[in-house]
Image: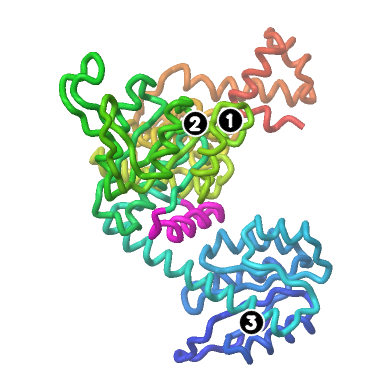
Amino acid sequence: MSDPARSPADRRPHVLVVDDDPIVADSLAEFLDREGCRASTCATGAEALNAVRDAADRDPVRVAICDLSLPDQSGLDTLDAIAEASPETVVVILTGYGTIQSAVTAIKRGAADYLTKPVIDDELRMCLEKALRQQALRAENHALKTQLDERFGLDNIVGHDHRMLRIYDLIEAVAPSRTTVLMTGESGVGKSLVARAIHRRSPRRDKPFVEIACGSIPETLLESELFGHVKGAFTGAHADKRGKFLAADGGTIFLDEINSASAAMQLKLLRVLQERTFEPVGSTRTVEVDARVVLASNQPLEDLVAAGEFRQDLYYRVNVVRIDVPPLRDRPGDIAPLAEHFIREHAREAGKQVTGLTDEALDALRRYPWPGNVRELSNAIERAVVLSRTPTLAVDDLPRAVADNAPPGALLSATEALIDDATAPWRPVPLAEALLEPERRIILKALRANGWNRQETARQLSINRTTLYKKMKQLGLDKLAG
């Protein structure tokens, strides 16, 4: 691996070439040096990851040009590893046998560009310029995000997954405009936080941000909530009411669960988006409004359009810029930083000195599928912080559903230690939980004695096979079965 020495005054952008063919690597490095970059080379994915990590503090790798086929792993796996270790580094994939499918795959995985060998100088030059611009934008966005987090408290948006980085880029790109934004994603993934981030990064940041969950308001009241009404418009309308759209005038209105809107409401929304006007309920007076509209759906709108449940013209009108927020289970690398963030947040609110998680507790968090997404993780950490008696959260501080995902032997390790050590201070533990570890040992011993024959194990333990399956899953023994 080559890494030219860098003088303190050398401010050339650092570009890493990852290719096991020394002729190709050296040729690219020479070209990069002529183009005003500081090039270094390596031959494997592992070396590339180490190079990126080692250079992080003194001279960060701004662009990595990585061969698709490496001796130890694929270029795409190396791309993922670099993205996790250094989110600001831009990766370009290089291959000698390019196909459209492999190019599409590389771009979907987060590559900035895709080059085929032999690389033409002009093509490489254009690719390098584009990659350096993108990297500068990422670095600028990161710095801006840090500043805005301090000013507006946006550190609730946490994540290093490459899909989250793409969302940050989209937020920065779309925020200055008035363009309608459609967000999709399961409940609890943080769509509201993204909407607030768009608003707070926009020129409208000093104007109102108004949020309304369309699915939680009865259809008969939703029109009045959005557009207001005049006195006497319907029974109970004792005075004029200003709607959410007018309240958001000059600012941003976030319509969550837009998929639940009725056909009549969809038509009214289409008019507001197209003409920026509406009439309050019971009024003939047309009101103009200047509100930036951000919408969210927890169901695929294209499926609802196909089923005739969502207007096609409204779908095309709202689907201008789309942000797909991934579920937490699809970005397990974000669980640890999110958990640390929520620990700080909830410990501060509860006035407790809680600083982290045991390895076993973190492993349980990573194994759990999080059907409630980020919101469920926040609630789980809040519960653990409130109930914890120590500065470090253990497995048995977590909700039972999460704790059941701890690796075999980790569950109730704290309880086991107290039982085995007679001199240790007693910590109250529910008896039902304390008995789980001895039960696990008995079942495990029986399974091993019977060569993991579940039917024979169930017979010897005098339980039916279904009960044995359930207990194996509960105690984490199903993961040991061959």
Tag 3 residue: 40
Residue 198 falls left or right of residue 72? left
Q: Amino acid at mark 2?
A: Asn
Q: Nearer the viewer, residue 401 or 431?
A: 401
**SS class, disc 3:** strand
Residue plotted at (67% across, 71% down): 47
- Picture coordinates of residue 463 (x, y %)? 68, 9
**SS class, disc 2:** helix
> Mark 2 or mark 3: which comes first in sequence?
3
Q: Nearer the viewer, residue 210 or 243?
A: 243
Numbered label attached to residue 123: none
- Quadrant containing the N terminus in the rendered view: bottom right
Q: Nearer the viewer, residue 421 or 53?
A: 53
- Residue sitting at the far right: 97
Residue 184 falls left or right of residue 271? right
User: What is the CA distance from the residue labelled 2 to the residue labelled 3?
Assistant: 51 Å
- Quadrant containing the C terminus in the rendered view: top right
Query: Cβ–Cβ below 8 Å for labels 2 and 1?
Result: yes
- Picture coordinates of residue 323 (x, y %)? 51, 48
Tag 1 residue: 304
Residue plotted at (32% across, 54% down): 200
Residue plotted at (76% across, 64% down): 72
Classify 10 Å Cα crowding around label 3: few (below 14), some (14-19), many (20 and above): many
Residue plotted at (55% across, 76% down): 132
Q: Nearer the viewer, residue 201 or 428?
A: 201
Q: Amino acid at mark 3?
A: Ser
